Amino acid sequence: MHQLAKKSKAIALATFAVASGFSMSSWAIDLQPGDATAPPPGLRSVQLSYLNAERVGASNARIDQNQVQFRYTQAFEVNKQPALFYLHTGTGRNDPSGAYASLPADNGMIDTTLVFAYWPYVDRASKTYVGVAGYLITPTGSYSSGRDINMGENRYRWAGQIAYQTRIAPDLDWMSAFDTLWFGKNDAGRLSNTVGTLEQKALYSAQTGFLYHLNKQYSFAAAYFYSEGGETIFNGGARNNSIKSHRYQLSAIRNSSIGRFTLQYGQDIDNNAALEDKHRIFLRYTKFF
């Protein structure tokens, strides 16, 4: 009976973490390899991505995520400096199991992201770039206050980011970026009737990585990500659950006449959130126009 009580308590705590919206992702604004390179004006691209992720927590709480994502990008100039806009959306499914087996799955749209990026400094000779970007994440994803696990978050989020990239060797690029993500309120959360409106403090993230160009066709990249902050607040009371996460991601890139193919694998190194990424796999195809 004691073990059963302990298990029930662990499940209840894990369910609270999911219901508060705090464990579905680290929410960092991850850049893809070479994203800080200033695009030529007029360049357009379409990207299709498939995501498979396994997230695991206490008492074998588990969520399997599968998504198909779409991104459209248009580059142009502002004050004769490079700029771009992109729209990112998609659909997918979250399947709970283990300690979460009693929770209903969800499938549908993810939240849609709108991005404007601008490069105030560009030196194409040395391949050095400084870019800034603003992100608006809109609550278009599937969401129900009656579910503990949702594809969307039922709130607006917005972020600011600055990135730096330069060529440090004949075939090696280094990129680093910092971003801050702010959260709107969710007043229709799973626990809103008992603990009130969900609010959340800002999340701060940094990333750094290297991109090695083996030749014109093949490139390889490795990146490290760190996030801290994002403490949740209900009815003005902080929950003392700020996130601290360390992650890595490896990428293999193939450029061809029909587009760019990217395979990425990543996982958490250390994460104090309710769920950790045991693996995150992306398959991406990008077509440039």
Image (tube, helix red, strand yellow):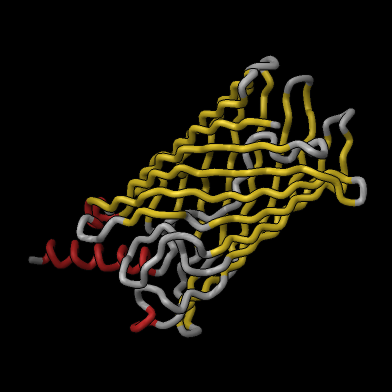
- Quarter placement of the C terminus: top right
Q: Residue furthest right?
A: 80
- Residue depicted at x 40% and y 40%: 52
Residue 265 pos. (x, y %): 48, 33
Location of residue 134 (image quadrant): bottom right
Residue 116 on image: x %, y %: 73, 53
Residue 263 vertical position relative to residue 109 in the rendered view, above or below? above
Left or right of 78 on screen, residue 13: left
Tell me which residue sits at (63%, 19%) in the image. 256
Rendered residue at 83%/36% (across/down): 128
Residue 80 x/y as whole percent: 92, 46
Q: Is residue 216 left or right of residue 97?
A: right
On the rendered structure, is 44 left or right of 32?
right
Q: Position of residue 106 (x, y in %)?
A: 33, 56
Is residue 104 depicted above or below 43 in this figure?
A: below
Check the image and report above or below for 261 versus 61: above
Furthest residue toward left: 1
Q: Nearer the viewer, residue 49 or 175?
A: 49
Which residue shows up at 45% across the image and 52% down it? 271
Please identify the quadrant where the N terminus is shown.
bottom left
- Residue situated in front as seen by the camera: 241 or 233: 233
Q: Is residue 26 above or below residue 252?
A: below
Total marks placed: 0
Q: Quadrant of residue 239?
A: bottom left
